[in-house]
Amino acid sequence: MSEDMVSSPSLWRPPVPIKDAIEQDAITPFPKPEAPEEEEEESQGDCYRRLMSSLPVKVYGERRYLEYQATWWPESAVQAVIAIQRRFRPRPSDVLLASYPKSGTTWMKALVFAIMSRKVYPLRDHPLLRLNPHDCVVHLSGAYATGKEAVVEALPSPRIMAVHMPFSTLPASVVVDSSSGCKIVYVWRDPKDVLVSLWHYYRKLRPEEAHVSEFHDLYESFCQGDTVFGPWWDNVLGYFRASVEMPTRVLFLRYEDMLEDTASAVVAIANFVGCPFSAEEERAGVVDAIVKLCSFEELKNLDTNMSGSNGHLIKLPSSSYFRKGVAGDWVGHMTREMADRIDSIIQGKFQGSGLEIKRAST
Ligand code: PAP
């Protein structure tokens, strides 16, 4: 967003909530990208089937994860990831929200959407009051996996999109081509709380599924690095290193720091995505209003987030994205020894990177 847009609200174009775009596409379909020739499509399909059957598999109850490009993906995501790598075309005004699952994605979607749309949607009549944050910001692999690629293509700029993909698996067009200028905001969180949050999520998916409902199984899997979109440490380190190498392209934020001082995070995000708050906005309390609108308590208690279902690959009650929203909930789920083991593993993986984890026993 240019300086002109900051000083002249009439030039601001808000990000469009993905749910509104999908509904509009159902009424007036967006132009579809050219479909591959039938023969080409067939040979691509053959290649894909061959690839899928050659990938290492982990089975958890009814869910299958495939290892592709050193990452464990939900089976339903692999084809979407390949399609994103081949066909996604970033725009300079795009903002990509990246995270390992259960690290603050929903919150980040709400914050970035609210920051980038603040001059257009009055906060008392904001899309976030009627739509879950996942209905405002599209998840790329979910869209590609469910035939909504054309909607993503047709979304007006600026687009905000989310991914759980590791940095190393992002399309070359996003990572290599610096002229694309696409910005990336990454949020990471204490892995012990990520693990606990992930476990509660799995329990909601299939409460009766004994295998994944065993916390210890998930804990072991996390320590081995084979939980979904993992290893967790590769996901975090990839974006951390990118943020060090390209600080104007990748912003690296920690969930716990955001909890402690949300207003500073909001200001940092706004500066990073190119729509800083004016002194007048700061005086008028716009930063605090955004912090409040996107706060856990506020979002959790909205009708839209207490009813209905949501999710990019699997649908869950919208309320399941708002569980506790605190730091340190792991204390009620694992022993000190279990916590120390995770911390030691992560400390070893982070060694020499410049990134540090706050250990449970310090
Ligand atoms: P996703 O990967 O499925 O999108 P994600 O939003 O990254 O999930 O993580 C969910 C966590 O963020 C939940 O943590 P918990 O299980 O430990 O409680 C959820 O409560 C928390 N969360 C959601 N919204 C907010 C918010 N506005 N502020 C702080 N935390 C939040």
Image (tube, rainbow, N blue to C red):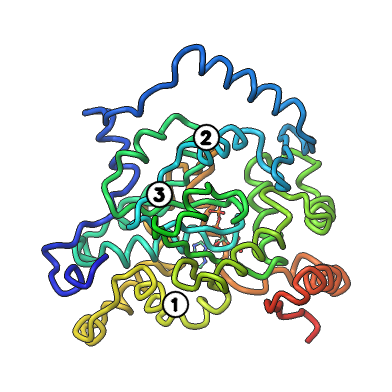
Image quarter for residue 280? bottom left
Q: Amino acid at mark 3?
A: Pro
Which residue occupies 77% across, 44% down?
A: 212
Per the image, label 2 sits on a secondary structure element best described as helix
Q: Dot 2 corresponds to which residue?
A: 83
Q: Is residue 255 left or right of residue 294?
A: right
**Vertical side of 212 occupied by 168: above or below:** below
Q: Amino acid at mark 2?
A: Ala
Name the disc covering residue 90, or none.
3
Label 2 within 8 A of ligand 1 by Cβ: no
- Does the residue at mark 1 contact the one at mark 2 (Cβ under 8 Å)? no
Name the disc covering residue 274, or none.
none
- Answer few, some or many: residues within 10 Å of disc 2's Cα (few below 14, many 20 plus, some between 14 and 19): some
Q: Is residue 181 left or right of residue 56?
A: left
How much space separates mark 1 and mark 2, taking CA atoms? 33 Å
Per the image, label 3 sits on a secondary structure element best described as loop
**Vertical side of 35 occupied by 74: above or below:** below
Name the disc covering residue 265, or none.
1
Give the mark toward the camera: 1 or 3: 3
- Answer few, some or many: residues within 10 Å of disc 3's Cα (few below 14, many 20 plus, some between 14 and 19): many
Which residue occupies 71% across, 45% down?
A: 72
- Answer few, some or many: residues within 10 Å of disc 1's Cα (few below 14, many 20 plus, some between 14 and 19): many
